[in-house]
Image: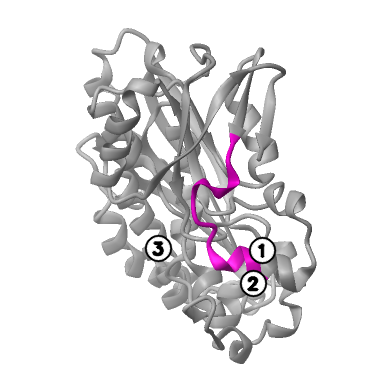
């Protein structure tokens, strides 16, 4: 008896590492210390010592049950982007610059090519965020996961000068809310998505073309989460002070928007101020989901919201466009009880 007969293939693990190295190398930053394959990842903070109060920020998350669609479609090279996005967007939302990322893949059986495809997506997300992929773990866990399934999670560490952190403390009535378009459902609410499209969750069903979507169902649902790091960097470069910021993830508008607010102000968002992607209309109709539940579960087409002074709206939108994002003025800040009104 040996480890391989118990279900863990050490040789496959070695091959996975070799296949992913080229993807990992493409994410390196000058601050990374050491090579690939050590027991820990090193990152020098020396270049940031000029900050008055350097502050580390971190975020951790996974892809969730969106992975079930990747399994059905046998497409594994984009879910890594989702994993990175969910973490680095949270760091950027607080005013931080993501520095590095580590991933964790747990699988029933280590198929090296599949693991390398997953890591290629993680590396792609890291490149989009400007973060280095400095480490990770692939755990082969036979008997715990089915052979053809895996879970994917990770965490990001970023940095900000404490005085430049975004905390909502300067918000006031009259400030304007600018939202950046999402790429679709992103990585939240997929347990409900899978329930609504239960009969379509086959390879053939996901390959079906939908006229109203302009693509196959699988393409739309598996579209990777937008990474807004560069757009927020461009806004900062433009000299705009972002007063508050909200990453619209699980819980939609009703849970996430109040997190950006201080006491005594509320956000008022106009639902007709931007186009809602058709996938949400299809979800609501097919699943008979009421409108409030949709806005309490999904991003409804807006993945990130910032609050800025009215004088900075034009500069903010131009900076976002320069980063390749699509911004909309979606509402404003008013005095009142902390919360959000959708009208």
Q: Residue at x 47, y 80 (%)?
A: 215
**Of helix, strand and loop, which one carries label 1?**
helix
Between discs 1 and 3, the one toward the N terminus: 1
Q: Residue at x 56, y 67 (%)?
A: 278
Which dot marks residue 121?
3
Q: Does 337 appear above or below 151?
A: above
Is there a contact, CB below 8 Å, between mark 2 and mark 1? yes
Image coords of residue 38 (percent x, y): 37, 47
Q: Is residue 52 magenta?
A: no
Chain part drawn in magenta: 269-282
Mark 2–mark 3 distance (CA, rounded to whole Å): 16 Å
18 left or right of 175 in image: left
Image coords of residue 218 (percent x, y): 55, 78
The number of numbered discs placed on residues in the rendered structure image is: 3
Residues packed near mark 2 inside 10 Å, few (<14), some (14 to 19) or many (20 plus) = some
Mark 1–mark 3 distance (CA, rounded to whole Å): 17 Å
Is there a contact, CB below 8 Å, between mark 2 and mark 3? no
**Residue bearing the label numbered 1:** 65
Is there a contact, CB below 8 Å, between mark 1 and mark 3? no
Between discs 2 and 3, the one toward the N terminus: 2
């Amino acid at each position: 008896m040996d480890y391989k007969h118990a279900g863990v293939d050490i040789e496959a693990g070695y091959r996975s590492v070799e296949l992913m190295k080229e993807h990992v190398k493409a994410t390196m930053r000058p601050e990374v210390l050491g090579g690939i394959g050590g027991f820990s990842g090193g990152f020098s903070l020396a270049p940031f010592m000029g900050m008055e109060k350097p502050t580390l920020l971190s975020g951790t998350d996974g892809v969730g049950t969106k992975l079930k669609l990747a399994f059905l479609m046998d497409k594994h090279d984009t879910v890594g982007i989702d994993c990175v996005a969910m973490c680095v967007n949270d760091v950027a939302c607080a005013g931080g610059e993501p520095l590095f990322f580590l991933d964790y893949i747990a699988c029933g059986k280590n198929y090296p090519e599949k693991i390398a495809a997953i890591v290629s997506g993680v590396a792609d997300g890291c490149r989009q965020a400007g973060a280095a992929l400095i480490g990770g773990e692939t755990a082969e866990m036979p008997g715990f996961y089915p052979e053809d399934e895996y879970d994917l999670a990770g965490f990001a560490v970023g940095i900000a000068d404490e005085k430049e952190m975004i905390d909502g403390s300067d918000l006031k009535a009259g400030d304007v809310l600018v939202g950046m378009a999402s790429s679709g459902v992103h990585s939240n609410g997929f347990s409900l998505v899978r329930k609504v499209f239960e009969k379509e969750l086959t390879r053939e069903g996901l390959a079906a073309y939908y006229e109203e979507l302009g693509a196959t169902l699988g393409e739309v649902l598996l579209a990777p989460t937008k990474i807004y790091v560069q757009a927020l960097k461009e806004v900062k470069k433009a000299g705009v002070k972002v007063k508050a910021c909200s990453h619209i993830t699980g819980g939609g508008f009703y849970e996430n928007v109040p997190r950006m607010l201080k006491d005594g102000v509320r956000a008022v968002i106009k639902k007709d101020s931007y186009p809602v992607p058709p996938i949400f209309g299809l979800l609501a109709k097919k699943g008979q989901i009421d409108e409030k539940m949709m806005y309490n579960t999904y991003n409804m087409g807006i993945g990130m919201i910032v609050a800025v002074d009215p004088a900075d709206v034009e500069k903010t939108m131009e900076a976002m466009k320069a980063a390749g994002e699509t911004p909309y003025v979606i509402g404003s800040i008013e005095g009142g009880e902390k919360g959000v009104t959708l009208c």
